């Protein structure tokens, strides 16, 4: 995305009835971006257009939006998180940055007035209080996972890959690829995490992300290392992994290797979507038995290379995929009766690894 004129992002977007969009990237990689990409999303067509860049935010590989506040990881050895505030002109400006106390933070979540971040390389979860101005206070906690898995290349130690609150807001879950585990925590008013449970998936699975069914009784765990998705029951912090399914069709080639990334559930709870990197597709699952079972409907070619992150727009009408290795974001119209996807657009962006829409 090219540099835009400050002020055009907010004013012009509002005038056209578009929705602000923020793109995560890697700034230290050849061909990467220069910061957080700014764009506009047309909810009528699913189309995207560039409006600018928030420069000098290093490696903002994951970005989340909360109203007029924006938070990004700085995925680097000395991990940090950056808070931004969206001004009246619609342009985000950096408020402050805080250390996560770990290496390569890759995921964020807001919960009870705190920002939580998952440090991939050091296998830890950090907690920062959110100030009234949206900035971040000093870290209040850092929990470090322990253990390893059978994959010597990717599971030599813990690798926290996602942190998210459960649907009730009572618990926080952290998904760890390195230990084949999902940890459940309670967050105190002082911003401290207390472990309440550990759920283990099958050895070598490499859980990366999970998503909850709207009824809150089931979760779906995307496993990066063996191309499976696991259906788990959930109740009050207790996650119980159950049946696993392949994220690929039976006739899928074995090369290049496939690595699932993002998983999400449609707002009505009828479908689950998962991005396959390597197979370069989006797997569409029908949800059955009230959330207790999944059935593979199709794998739709993603129109790019290595779909790192996928998201649904607020209406559930379009799905967007950030294709890291082909420098494009593709848009798909969702058939809300069958769950199937039809590509409608493609937008060029430097190493897109996250797409965040402001609702």
Image (cartoon, grey):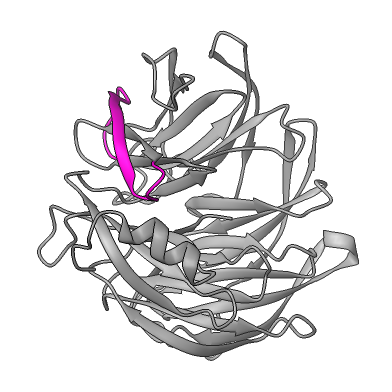
Q: Quarter of the image for the N terminus: give it.
A: bottom left
Q: How many marks?
A: 0
Q: Is residue 76 shown left or right of residue 302?
A: left
Query: Compared to 90, does 120 lie above or below?
Result: above
**Residue 98 appears in the rendering:** yes
Q: Is residue 151 shown left or right of residue 332?
A: left
Any magenta on residue 104? yes
As rendered, which of 281 and 334 lies closer to the eye? 334
Residue 148 figure quarter:
top left
Residue at 32 percent of width and 51 percent of height:
61
Residue at 31 percent of width and 55 percent of height:
7
Query: Compared to 286, does 201 lie above or below?
Result: above
Q: Which residues are magenta?
A: 87-105
Residue 351 figure quarter:
bottom left
Q: Position of residue 327 (x, y in %)?
A: 26, 75
Residue at 71 percent of width and 81 percent of height:
339
| Residue found farthest to the right | 289
Query: Compared to 90, does 273 lie above or below?
Result: below
Residue at 33 percent of width and 40 percent of height:
73
Q: Position of residue 176 (x, y in %)?
A: 48, 40
As rendered, which of 329 and 232 lies closer to the eye? 329
Q: Is residue 185 shown left or right of residue 254?
A: right
| Residue found farthest to the top | 190
């Amino acid at each position: 995305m090219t540099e835009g004129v400050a002020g055009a992002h907010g004013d012009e977007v509002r005038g056209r009835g578009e929705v602000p969009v923020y793109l995560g990237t890697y700034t230290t990689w050849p061909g990467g971006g220069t910061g957080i990409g700014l764009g506009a999303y047309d909810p009528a067509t699913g189309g995207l257009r560039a409006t600018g860049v928030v420069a000098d935010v290093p490696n903002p590989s994951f970005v989340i939006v909360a109203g007029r506040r924006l938070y990004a990881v700085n995925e680097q050895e000395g991990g940090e998180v950056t808070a931004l505030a969206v001004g009246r002109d619609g342009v985000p400006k950096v408020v402050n940055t805080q250390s996560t106390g770990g290496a390569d933070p890759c995921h964020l979540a807001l919960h009870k007035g705190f920002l939580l971040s998952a440090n991939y390389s050091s296998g830890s979860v950090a907690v920062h209080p959110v100030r009234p101005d949206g900035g971040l206070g000093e870290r209040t906690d850092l929990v470090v996972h322990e253990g390893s898995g059978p994959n010597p290349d990717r599971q030599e130690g813990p690798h926290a890959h996602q942190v998210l609150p459960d649907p009730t807001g009572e618990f926080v879950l952290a998904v760890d690829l390195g230990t084949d585990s999902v940890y459940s925590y309670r967050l105190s008013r002082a911003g401290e995490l207390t472990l309440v449970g550990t759920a283990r998936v099958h050895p070598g699975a490499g859980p990366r992300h999970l998503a909850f069914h709207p009824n809150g009784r089931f979760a779906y765990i995307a496993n990066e290392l063996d191309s499976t998705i696991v259906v788990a029951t959930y109740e009050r912090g207790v996650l119980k992994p159950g049946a696993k399914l392949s994220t690929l069709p039976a006739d899928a080639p074995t090369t290049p290797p496939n690595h699932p990334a993002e998983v999400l559930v449609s707002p009505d709870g009828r479908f689950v979507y998962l991005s396959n990197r390597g197979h370069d597709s989006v797997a569409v699952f029908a949800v059955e038995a009230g959330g207790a079972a999944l059935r593979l409907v199709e794998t739709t070619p993603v129109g790019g290379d290595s779909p790192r992150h996928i998201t649904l727009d607020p209406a559930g009408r379009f799905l967007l995929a950030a294709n890291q290795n082909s420098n494009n974001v593709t848009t798909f119209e969702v058939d809300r009766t069958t769950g199937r996807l039809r590509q409608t657009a493609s937008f060029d962006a430097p190493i897109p690894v996250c797409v965040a829409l402001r609702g």
